[in-house]
Amino acid sequence: MNYLKSNVSLISFVFVFFLLAGCHTNVPTNKPVLVSTPEKMDKKTSETISNVLEYALQHNGDIGDTIRLQFTGLVNNFYKANDDNNVWSHQEKWEPLADSLYQFIEHAALSGLFSNDYHFKKLRTLKDALDMDSVKRTDANLWTKADLMLTDGFMHLVKDLKQGRLNKDSISYNKKELSDSFYSATLTNLFSTKQLTEVLNGLQPKEAGYWALKNCIPGFIDSMDKRIYTYVTYPFKPNDEKDSLSFIKNLQQRLSESKCIAFTSILPDTLQLKLAIKKYQHLKNIRQDGKISATFIKMLNGSDGERFKRIALTLDRYKQLPDSMPEKYIWVNLPAYYMQLWDHDTVVINSKIICGKPATRTPLLNSYITDMVTYPTWTVPNSIIVKQYLPKLKNNPNYLTSIGLHLVDSKGETVSGNDVKWSKYSKGIPYKIMQGSGDDNALGILKFNFSNAYAVYLHDTNQRYLFKNAVRSLSHGCVRVQEWQKLAFYIARNDSMNVKPGETLHYTTDSIMAWLDRKENKRISVKNKISLFIRYFTCEAKNGKIKFYDDIYGEDKFIREKYFTDK
């Protein structure tokens, strides 16, 4: 009985094996289909396209020879609307648009893209064969593959140039997926106008900063070190021997690529690794301490290849902005530590900022300024209370008084820290912790409120000396603005110039100055709300070159490891 069962199992296995193998060999393009004359090629290619797409729809985009369409449904719909006719070649000759698209894909890096996302390797092999081999040029299956890959590649370009590769999040303005009709209309428009550059440029952001950065890419690529270096992920998981050994192996390989250590199957010991690190530090002309640190690993990973990925994802971040920016808006770029106020494509205020520490990051958001407050009070956010103040209050009930803060109950009355049983609380307290207005207030003498879920603001500071620091990720999450007075006065003038007939404006720049002189606490409603964008762009064009900023929150590192690990 067992013998019979074994035989049945073996027969079943063999049947399934050959069934699967048969499925693979049945891909319509796996065998040559030679055509006798160029005049017959288009008809045969059209027939083959129909068969291949039918197969691809049932097999996750597979069209043979490890080629897989990424936009199978869109490609199929386009060809069905065009009677399955080939569109990129006719009678064994490439259409001019096919050459143009191929060239664009080959040089996709100039747009912050990666050629192989659009079938470049396969297209290059196929194109070389069709251009140089007279027999292969008569194969309808090869022309079919070329046609489908070019169409699929174009659809992919439309998506990446229009919306980018990053997931939609709370700050994205392009949350909806592009419609099928948008893709087909764009391709139809291309064949109508015959203007590839114009069509593809029209998909991209209109922002001047986007084009300035993109226009710097050719110079960056011309001078870049194109060698591929091992990327070292750090930190490794604590108490995970496998992960720590993997880290050492990757570090050894990366150092070997800079000729600082030999790469062998035997991992280096502590002394060997220290000497190798010192050798690398010597090459970079920095302090030779031989220590592994986040700063050192960041330097190792700072290759031109990695910098190009940062350019690529910055271009994609532009694609999360509105199709057209407001006439007037405030732009805060956290890694660059600056705030700009834009008015009709001109920067009218440029200010240094201080933003959140890595542990208390400033959130990325879209909002608008609703009001300003002179000599504000400060209500401490719950996150700061839990992380910083509560542990200290459990040891010293008078801690708040010692740092100029006071406790307020739900009735607005001040409560003594000695009257609270602090040991009861761990996730929050039923009180507010506040700092009164004054020159020593953490918010300075003026703050700008805007609608957000994070209890953060733009504001002045009582620590203005910190603006001289190069690294200014120092706050609890709010954004401190060096040129707060210029911003307040601009908002006041903007409201004054836009007063409608019959309206009364209850403040001016003079009244703001008077309230500040008298140290009065006043809330000023802003009539013409100015949009605010807080963003994270780690590179930009400056004087025709690309300037890179520190990845202060590790956002680039996270995205690189999520989206670009295979690039």
Image (cartoon, grey):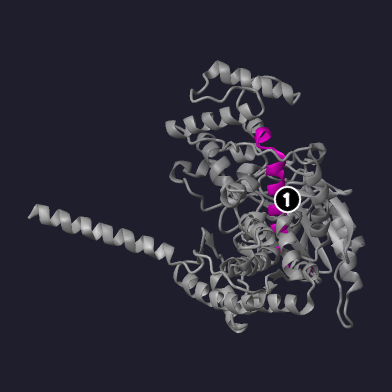
Q: Tell me, yes or no, if residue 450 can be seen here.
A: no
Residue 333 lies in the magenta stretch: no
Identity of the residue drawn at 57% across and 59% down: 411
Closer to the camera in the image, 521 or 492:
492
User: Looking at the picture, how far across and down is residue 567, in whole percent?
Assistant: 62, 48
- In the rendered view, would you say 168 is above or below 242? below
Q: Residues within 10 Å of mark 1 (few under 14, many from 20)?
A: many
Is 360 placed left or right of 331 in the picture? left
Is 144 placed left or right of 310 in the picture? left
Q: Main secondary structure of the magenta part?
A: helix
Closer to the camera in the image, 43 or 206:
43
User: Looking at the picture, how far across and down is residue 381, in whole percent?
Assistant: 61, 51
Tell me the amino acid under the disc marked 1.
Ile
In terms of image quadrants, where is residue 22?
A: bottom left
In terms of image quadrants, where is residue 158?
A: bottom right
Identity of the residue drawn at 58% across and 30% down: 253
User: Looking at the picture, how far across and down is residue 338, in whole percent?
Assistant: 80, 49
Closer to the camera in the image, 449 or 433:
449
Secondary structure of the residue carrying tag 1 is helix
Q: Which residues are magenta?
A: 298-325
Residue for badge 1: 311
Identity of the residue drawn at 68% across and 74% down: 91
- In the rendered view, would you say 229 is above or below 150? above
Q: Tell me, yes or no, if residue 161 can be seen here.
A: yes
